[in-house]
């Protein structure tokens, strides 16, 4: 979809196509805000969190079933403590850990912009210049019945700025692969681990 705005005061015409904005001044086109944005799949994230909460509920109900089947057993007290600690740690992690929900490649400023937030905070923006950026990419692998998820880490020099993991952030495999392909197209170094 293309929008055309003309200002008689300045004699400029502005054309907006998707996420790119072009200014036409004296018949020369100047591109502004050449940005490609990748956002997480909110539906996938909600499904994943629902599965995690159902798993925690099942874990919490195990001691109750265990108490019904085997009364007066010593293990039940320590198991309640383990379940309570496990659920508390997961709750704290969900509330306070910064999750990256948007990755933008700004071609005009030659930078990668990462937006992240936790459930209790506002969105925070981190920026990495193309020249300083490096991506570490871990492909999906499996061993017997165990499988590891696809992971993409954004590095500034040797320091990790943010990580996208298929199972944690709600980004799909296809979306992570699109980010990797876009970074390769802009000559950002990618290390496959």
Image (tube, rainbow, N blue to C red):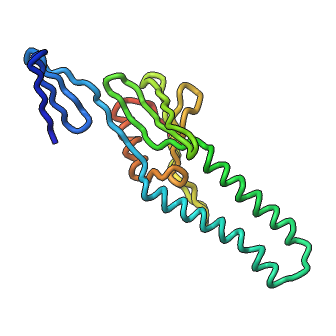
85 lies left or right of 168: right
Residue 136 visible (yes or no): no
For the image, the number of numbered tags is 0
Q: Position of residue 43 (x, y in %)?
A: 42, 58
Q: Is residue 121 above or below residue 156?
A: below
Q: Position of residue 40 (x, y in %)?
A: 43, 48
155 lies left or right of 62: left
Q: Which residue is farthest front?
A: 9
Q: Position of residue 160 (x, y in %)?
A: 58, 33
Residue occupying image coordinates x 19% and y 26%? 22
35 lies left or right of 92: left
Residue occupying image coordinates x 29% and y 27%? 33
Residue 45 visible (yes or no): yes
Q: Is residue 156 above or below residue 137?
A: above
25 lies left or right of 111: left
Q: Nearer the viewer, residue 161 or 13?
A: 13
Quarter of the C terminus within the rendering: top right
Q: Which residue is farthest bottom?
A: 69
Q: Position of residue 8 (x, y in %)?
A: 8, 19
Residue occupying image coordinates x 19% and y 20%? 30
Quarter of the N terminus within the rendering: top left
Q: Nearer the viewer, residue 83 or 10?
A: 10
Q: Write down the quadrant of residue 44 in the picture.
A: bottom left
Q: Write down the quadrant of residue 143 in the picture.
A: bottom right
Residue occupying image coordinates x 10% and y 25%? 6
């Amino acid at each position: 979809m293309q929008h055309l705005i003309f200002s008689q005061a300045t004699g400029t015409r502005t054309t907006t196509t998707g996420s790119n904005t072009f200014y036409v001044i004296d018949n020369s086109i100047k591109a502004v805000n050449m940005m490609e944005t990748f956002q997480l799949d909110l539906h996938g994230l909600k499904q994943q969190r629902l599965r995690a909460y159902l798993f925690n509920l099942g874990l919490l109900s195990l001691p109750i079933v265990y108490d019904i089947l085997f009364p007066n057993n010593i293990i039940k007290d320590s198991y309640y403590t383990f379940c309570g600690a496990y659920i508390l740690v997961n709750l704290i992690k969900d509330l306070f850990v910064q999750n990256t929900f948007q990755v933008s490649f700004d071609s005009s400023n030659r930078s990668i912009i990462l937006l992240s937030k936790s459930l209790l905070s506002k969105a925070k923006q981190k920026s990495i210049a193309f020249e300083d950026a490096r991506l570490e990419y871990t492909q999906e692998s499996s061993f017997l019945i165990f499988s590891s998820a696809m992971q993409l880490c954004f590095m500034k020099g040797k320091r990790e700025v943010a990580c996208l993991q298929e199972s944690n952030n709600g980004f799909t495999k296809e979306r992570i692969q699109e980010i990797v392909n876009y970074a390769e197209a802009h000559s950002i170094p990618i290390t496959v681990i």
